[in-house]
Image (cartoon, rainbow, N blue to C red):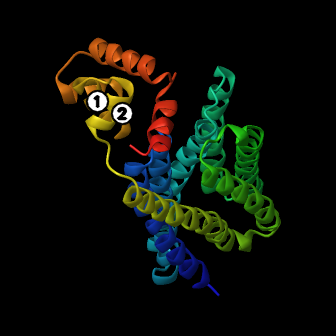
Amino acid sequence: MQAVPLLLSLFALAIVSMDLALAIVWTRRAHYRWTRMAVVFLASLLGAVVIFALDQYSFLVFTGTARTILHYVWEGILVADSAFILTLILFAANWIIARPMPQTEVISAFIAGAAYLIVSSLWIALSSPVFSVLQYLVWTLAVSYCMAVIGRGTKNIEEKAVRRVTKALMVISVCMLPVVILSMIFSFMRPFSIPIVCLAYTIAILVFLFAAVARTERRDEAKPGLTFESVSERYRITEREFEVIKLIKAGLTNKEIASELSISVNTVNNHIANIFAKTEVRSRIDLLNLIEEASW
């Protein structure tokens, strides 16, 4: 039984690694700025799973002082990484639905991360079950906040597949609640609950990312490339504006576009304003949607 948490964590490690690889591919093809945050999240989660697996491995292989020292080292790193992930998901819930996060909630997100860090440090130092329960409570409250924010703003998510996966994650959160409660009551469940919960979420994300990448590949194959002739004829776009459109489609910021074209940011802003006026759109998202609909 002692080897089960290690086996589960290794399985989770494989799933998260695939998630991260697919997320990187999808980020390069998708036009949503928050997808970069998804890569950061999955990279942090991968680090957490690696540290958890090392902790379980050390428990099985080493004994005495060596086991104790390694446990404290791995737990310390895992707590710091988990506090970062907790804070990040509070921001990510708002990024996904394009909701401006109120200043009070921004402050609360950092307070939640700090609270988890403090409670977890006390748990490591004192091994009190009270602090273990508080750890789970902080995470439960954070996930509940995320699900509430996403639930209220699901209609603002433009990509249908993203809406579906967010709904799936909300269902998973409800299903994982008994596992969390049992872990708070029975301490021996902790090594099992962490990889189980991780697997539940990451498998759902893996299915979504696999479908998303496959869909973008089929879409790219089906549609002709973005050509200057098609844009200039329809919208009277100049060559320079066409270059800006291509860089917007590649996901570059105004500053990055200015650096790429060796022009000032103000000039880029003027080009984008002209593009918006000619295509009658009001945002980058609208422009990218227009590109997709027009099959440029």
Q: Amino acid at mark 2?
A: Ile
- Residue 10 lies left or right of residue 249; in this view the side is right
Q: Which mark is residue 242?
A: 1
Label 2: how many Cα within 10 Å (few below 14, some 14–19, many 20+): many
Image height check: is 236 above or below 92?
above
Tell me residue 99's x, y (percent).
Answer: 64, 30
Of the residues shown, which amino acid type is indicated by label 1? Phe
Q: Which residue is mark 2?
A: 248
Marks 1/2: CA–CA distance: 10 Å
**Residue 159, horizontal then vertical, whole percent:** 59, 47
In the image: residue 108, left or right of residue 177: left
Element at label 1: helix
Please state the horizontal and vertical placement of residue 296, each as a whole percent of the image: 38, 43
Ranked by sequence position, the earlier of labels 1 and 2 is 1
Q: Is residue 10 left or right of residue 265?
A: right
Q: Residue at x 66, y 71 (%)?
A: 196
Residue shown at 60% from the left, 41% from the top: 96
Closer to the camera in the image, 79 or 87: 87
Residue at image position (61%, 40%) is 113
Q: Position of residue 185 (x, y in %)?
A: 83, 65
The image quarter containing residue 217 is bottom left
The quarter of the picture where the N terminus appears is: bottom right
Q: Nearer the viewer, residue 168 or 175?
A: 168
The residue carrying pointer 1 sits among few (fewer than 14), some (14 to 19) or many (20 or more) residues within 10 Å by Cα, namely many
